[in-house]
């Protein structure tokens, strides 16, 4: 492993966190699916350094395909990395958790979650480090109460750390998960996303780890109630057809724009684990347009024009305790 004189203890704590979170999420997803279980594939990068645990679930009662992955990788900073990724230093270290879940039922949304930590080294010392991550929702049919629940869950977490976080990270998410080549069409209804957050006097490394932990475990509160509410809605071939059209947009973003995918491929990451995020079936129909006034068109319109889910809903007036009480009462 990359040898440094500082922050090894902190790195160890981060690694424990992402593995514990991986276990908790996999256990909950298996329980709600009731059929499929995760298959674990441990892998190593060989001479490049590090490895990971890829866990994949497929052909379940609820989840058609999904993965909850952790990776702890390191190596030398190459000229390609300096040019493509705009980073400097002699060595690098990165560790994180990344998940994508693609459901069978088109009325259950796809979800993505990623929390990561990165270090750069010069002469064996930490020269730079930062945190990044977020969670976002990609529905195929729009249920406004689901979107509000998802965003409110993360607003509550953000507000515990800094009330400026949610509006900032919500906008960053809306502006990041977007297919610019399709008239700035978002791949979903967003969530939160932050990147290159560096420890400082006000917000040290422990602060950002605590924030990542709170957001990481909030995934269960944000997503599972939506799955439970929508998993038994009947659907037909038309609904599946639209799901595959929208999945195509998901693929386009991940392969063309996503920095995590690009970083993994540029640093000799494990291709199978990186491309685990792609859905099992997609459609790329030429110039497909949903029928005007249809539920499909309503979803596409939201993707073209992101909405402020909290301000436009009375739940914005609730404090975190009241929101939690209502969730526990209804779910």
Image (cartoon, rainbow, N blue to C red):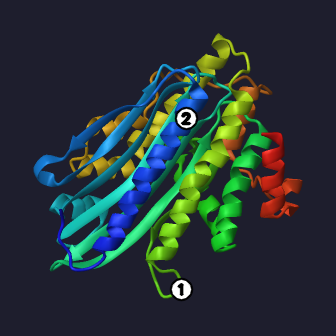
Rendered location of residue 60, percent (x, y): 52, 21
Instruction: Identify the residue shown where x is 36% and y is 36%.
Output: 275
Rendered location of residue 230, percent (x, y): 72, 28
- Give whichever of 70, 109 is nearer the camera: 70
Instruction: Identify the residue shown where x is 42% and y is 54%.
Output: 18
* Residue 46 visible in rendering: yes
Q: Residue furthest bottom?
A: 201
The quadrant in which residue 108 appears is top right
Rendered location of residue 289, percent (x, y): 64, 25
Q: Secondary structure at mark 2?
A: helix
Instruction: Identify the residue shown where x is 46% and y is 84%.
Output: 200
Q: Residue furthest top?
A: 237
* Residue 287 visible in rendering: no
The quadrant in which residue 107 appears is top right
Q: Label 2: which residue?
A: 29
User: How many tags in the picture?
Assistant: 2
Please state which of the two labelled residues, at mark 2 or mark 1, is closer to the viewer. Answer: 2
| Circle on res. 41 | none
Please determine whether, in this image, residue 38 is positioned above or below residue 25. above
Instruction: Identify the residue shown where x is 70% and y is 54%.
Output: 153
- Asked whether, in this view, residue 329 is left or right of residue 62, the answer is right
Q: Residue furthest left?
A: 47
- Asked whether, in this view, residue 19 is left or right of residue 122, the answer is right
Q: Secondary structure at mark 1?
A: loop
- Give whichever of 162, 175 is nearer the camera: 162
Query: Is mark 2 in CB contact (under 8 Å) with mark 1?
Result: no
Q: Label 1: which residue?
A: 202
Please determine whether, in this image, residue 234 is positioned above or below residue 267. above
């Amino acid at each position: 492993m990359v040898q440094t004189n500082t922050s090894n203890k902190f790195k160890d704590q981060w690694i424990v966190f992402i593995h514990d979170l991986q276990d908790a999420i996999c256990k909950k997803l298996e329980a709600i699916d009731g059929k499929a279980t995760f298959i674990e594939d441990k892998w190593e990068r060989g001479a490049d350094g590090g490895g990971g645990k890829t866990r994949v679930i497929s052909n379940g009662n609820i989840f058609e395909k999904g993965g909850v992955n952790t990776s702890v990788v390191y190596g030398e900073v190459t000229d390609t990395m300096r040019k493509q990724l705009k980073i400097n230093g002699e060595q690098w270290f990165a560790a994180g958790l990344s998940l994508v879940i693609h459901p069978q039922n088109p009325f259950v949304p796809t979800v993505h979650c990623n929390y990561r930590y990165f270090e750069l080294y010069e002469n064996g010392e930490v020269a730079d480090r930062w945190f990044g991550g977020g969670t976002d929702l990609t529905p195929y049919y729009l249920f406004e109460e689901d979107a509000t629940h998802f965003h409110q869950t993360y607003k509550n977490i953000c507000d515990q750390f800094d009330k400026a976080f949610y509006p900032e990270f919500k906008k960053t998410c809306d502006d990041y998960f977007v297919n610019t080549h399709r008239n700035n069409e978002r791949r979903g209804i967003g969530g939160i996303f932050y990147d290159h957050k560096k420890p400082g006097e006000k917000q040290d490394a422990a602060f950002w780890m605590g924030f990542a932990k709170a957001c990481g475990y909030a995934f269960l509160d944000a997503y599972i109630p939506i799955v439970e509410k929508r998993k038994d809605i009947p659907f037909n071939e038309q609904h599946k057809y639209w799901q595959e059209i929208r999945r195509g947009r998901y693929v386009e973003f991940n392969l063309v724009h996503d920095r995590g995918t690009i970083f993994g491929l540029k640093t000799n990451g494990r291709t199978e684990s990186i491309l685990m995020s792609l859905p099992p079936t997609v459609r790329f129909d030429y110039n497909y347009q949903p029928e005007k006034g249809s539920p499909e068109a309503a979803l596409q319109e939201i993707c073209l024009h992101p909405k402020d889910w909290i301000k436009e809903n009375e739940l914005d007036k609730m404090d975190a305790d009241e929101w939690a009480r209502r969730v526990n009462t209804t779910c």
